Image (cartoon, rainbow, N blue to C red):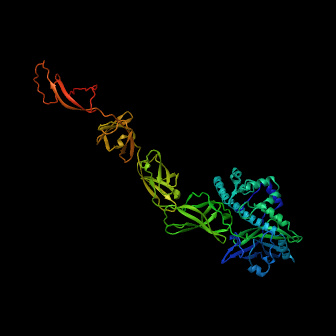
């Protein structure tokens, strides 16, 4: 929410000379806020409301020698001075204040709340109330800027603390984790840091540089104005920034400069006002000062801003990728989010849970915001989940101060048993002697941990895989040294003890098929290719061919196939394919060449005529199909194919001589 602007080295150096950093630890103040029947520590309160009851306890050491007067003041706008009864004076050294603290109710119409810590003097309370009531607008502005600067400082501290925890073992990991932290806290990193040696990168990322600004559309224009314009003009422009709402927010250092100028203009001969950043931890406001307090005239009055008074604005958190689906059981489960940096740098959001509606019973998983992971992860070990089907929807729920908060929704998956199958096109794709890729279809792949294949002998082999679509696994299986036979693909999923076992079969190198050739009406066909001894049968159009004889011609096989049905109805010249079944169960396809049917004739009758000029033969033949060579053969034919025998066709008759 707050826009943090980190200036360049020259500007930062100059600014530090004018306004020292808030690196001095000031006194601590404990604060609780009660609204109705609910009480929260100040670290969990983003906004106050009129009617809230504040418990304020100055946490000063027992050895505190200088007496501080704590004054709680409420404001009601820049043009409406608060009444005197909106100021509460507390003597911090009194036993009642030290042991019990003080209760203060926020009055109606109050818009801002301040705490002053002033050295005890004779007129401390009256002097301070006159200053506030005399120039309420200055204190309204100071309150808004201190609130903005305190939240931005917490974001800065969270970023620096997270960067220090990133290990230096791998430059790639450092870069990825730093970018996750930057995204969570809406920080734009200085990419030049990653060009340095890895041991110098964390220090570079923790420096204030021109490349490290809050990731906001207004940030770059502010940098440009700072680099080329008048700093005072910039401060005046920043004075119109809203606080914790829409629009351009007051940058961290800009707010510091502006607040310091405003408060310095209020000094008197006895008092000077110095700002303090309030960095809450649970119920304690840890104050950070930019200058050491003075106990001589002019004495220092520490100005502390409490949370703003008004309606709460819930964080605008949203998923990094709304279409992404998450496996709840995956280790390191993190819901990637962006848009609400205060969720990661403060304790304003708490009791976060992921509420999942299920058919059997709703599930609530405790979450924690982790900027180093770039999102919301589980706050503890995951308990066993009840059975679920299909995709689930989880909604982020929690508390934002006193308010119930419902955040974005996320798409979720859980592991399911036995939902995988081999793609139909890959049923016989596993062939020894090469590397094959299988396509596994089934449930969502988000919960898949690892895959391995187990052959009949040897140890299981871990497999490389990817998921191009949520319901598909592409698995690369090395088969160079494998043997034909059964195998088992084991799919391990997060949250399941036993893997899903998918039975497979590894095949030897398949036959290579060229084509099947025959003439329409022929009973025999010729199949050409290699490794045809693996062929069991060929099927097409209800016709089945079975092997009748294998011959080897040069480097190829020729397999004579005999049909079990008629082939006369096959269309010559039509491109078609037949199904080839191998002996190991695999199926292949082969192109079929059907030639025009061969001519077919029917012998109606035959007879022989003796040679009348020769002497009668004394030889009598024992069969009607036997003729003497000198006789004349007379026969009658009828054409079956074609139906009409062309006159230009010839019939050749040859004698068959038997030994």
Please state, as top left, top right, bottom left or bottom right, where the N terminus lies in the image: bottom right
Which of 379/471 is in front? 471
Expressed as whole percent of the image width and height from the top left, the position of residue 37 reads 66, 78
Above-or-below relation of 594 to 635: below
Expressed as whole percent of the image width and height from the top left, the position of residue 213 reads 73, 56
Quadrant in which residue 247 is drawn: bottom right
Expressed as whole percent of the image width and height from the top left, the position of residue 12 reads 79, 57
Which of 490/443 is in front? 443
Quadrant in which residue 54 is drawn: bottom right
Residue reaching furthest bottom?
96
Above-or-below relation of 207 to 621: below
* Residue drawn where x is 53% and y is 51% of the image: 468
* Residue drawn where x is 63% and y is 64% of the image: 369
Expressed as whole percent of the image width and height from the top left, the position of residue 78 reads 80, 68
Res. 25 visible in picture: yes
Which of 405/210 is in front? 405
Which of 649/21 is in front? 649
Q: Left or right of 254: which side holds 522?
A: left
Please state, as top left, top right, bottom left or bottom right, where the C terminus lies in the image: top left
Above-or-below relation of 430 to 215: above
* Residue drawn where x is 11% and y is 19% of the image: 615
Quadrant in which residue 279 is drawn: bottom right
Res. 460 visible in picture: no
Residue reaching furthest top?
613
């Amino acid at each position: 929410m707050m826009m943090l602007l980190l200036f360049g080295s020259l500007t930062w150096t100059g600014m530090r000379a004018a306004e020292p950093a808030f690196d001095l630890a000031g006194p601590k103040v404990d604060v609780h806020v009660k609204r109705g029947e609910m009480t929260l520590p100040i670290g969990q309160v983003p906004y106050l409301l009129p009617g809230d009851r504040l418990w304020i306890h100055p946490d000063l050491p027992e050895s505190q020698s200088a007496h501080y007067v704590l004054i709680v003041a409420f404001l009601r706008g820049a043009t409406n001075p608060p009444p005197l009864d909106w100021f509460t004076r507390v003597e911090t050294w009194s036993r009642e204040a030290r042991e019990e603290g003080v209760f203060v109710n926020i009055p109606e119409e109050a818009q801002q709340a301040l705490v002053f810590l002033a050295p005890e003097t004779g007129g401390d309370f009256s002097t301070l109330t006159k200053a506030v009531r005399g120039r309420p607008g200055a204190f309204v502005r100071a309150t808004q800027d201190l609130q903005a600067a305190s939240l931005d400082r917490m974001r800065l501290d969270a970023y620096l603390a997270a960067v220090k925890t990133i290990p230096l073992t791998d430059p790639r990991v450092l870069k990825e984790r730093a970018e996750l932290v930057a995204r969570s806290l809406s920080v734009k990193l200085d990419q030049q840091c990653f060009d340095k040696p890895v041991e110098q990168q964390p220090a570079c990322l923790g420096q204030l540089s021109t490349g490290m600004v809050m990731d906001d559309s207004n940030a770059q224009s502010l940098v440009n104005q700072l680099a080329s314009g008048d700093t005072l003009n910039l401060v005046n422009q920043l004075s119109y920034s809203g606080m914790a709402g829409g629009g351009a927010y007051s940058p961290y250092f800009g707010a510091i400069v502006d607040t310091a100028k405003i408060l310095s203009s209020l000094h008197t001969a006895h008092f000077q006002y110095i700002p303090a950043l309030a960095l809450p931890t649970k119920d304690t406001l840890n104050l950070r000062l930019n200058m050491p307090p003075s106990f001589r005239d002019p004495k220092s009055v520490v100005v502390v801003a409490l949370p703003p008074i008004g309606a709460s604005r819930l964080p605008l958190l949203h998923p990094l990728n709304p279409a992404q689906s998450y496996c709840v059981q995956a280790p390191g489960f993190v819901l990637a989010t962006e848009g609400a940096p205060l969720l990661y740098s403060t304790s304003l959001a708490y009791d976060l849970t992921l509420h999942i509606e299920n058919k059997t019973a709703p599930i609530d998983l405790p979450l924690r915001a982790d900027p180093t992971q770039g999102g919301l992860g589980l706050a503890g070990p995951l308990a066993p989940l009840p059975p679920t089907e299909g995709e689930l929807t989880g909604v982020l729920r929690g508390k934002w101060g006193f308010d119930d908060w419902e955040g974005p929704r996320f798409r979720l998956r859980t592991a399911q048993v036995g939902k995988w199958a081999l793609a139909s096109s890959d049923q016989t794709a596993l062939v020894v002697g090469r590397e094959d890729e299988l396509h596994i279809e089934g449930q969502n792949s988000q919960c898949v941990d690892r895959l391995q294949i187990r052959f009949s002998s040897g140890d299981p082999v871990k497999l490389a895989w990817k998921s191009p679509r949520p319901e598909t696994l592409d698995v690369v299986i090395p088969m160079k040294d494998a043997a034909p036979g059964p195998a088992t693909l084991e799919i391990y999923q997060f949250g399941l003890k036993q893997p899903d076992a998918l039975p497979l079969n590894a095949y030897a190198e398949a036959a290579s098929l060229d084509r099947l050739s025959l003439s329409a009406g022929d009973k025999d066909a010729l199949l050409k290719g290699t490794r045809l001894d693996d062929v069991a049968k060929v099927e097409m159009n209800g016709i089945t061919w079975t092997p009748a004889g294998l011959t080897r011609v040069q480097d190829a096989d020729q397999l004579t196939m005999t049909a079990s049905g008629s082939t006369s109805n096959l269309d010559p010249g039509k491109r078609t394919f037949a199904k080839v079944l191998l002996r190991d169960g695999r199926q292949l396809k082969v192109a079929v060449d059907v030639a025009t049917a061969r001519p077919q004739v029917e012998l109606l009758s035959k007879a022989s005529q003796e040679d009348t000029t020769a002497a009668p033969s004394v030889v009598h033949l024992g069969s009607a199909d036997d003729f003497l060579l000198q006789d004349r053969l007379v026969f009658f034919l009828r054409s079956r194919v074609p139906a009409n025998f062309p006159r230009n066709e010839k019939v050749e008759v040859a004698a068959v001589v038997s030994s």
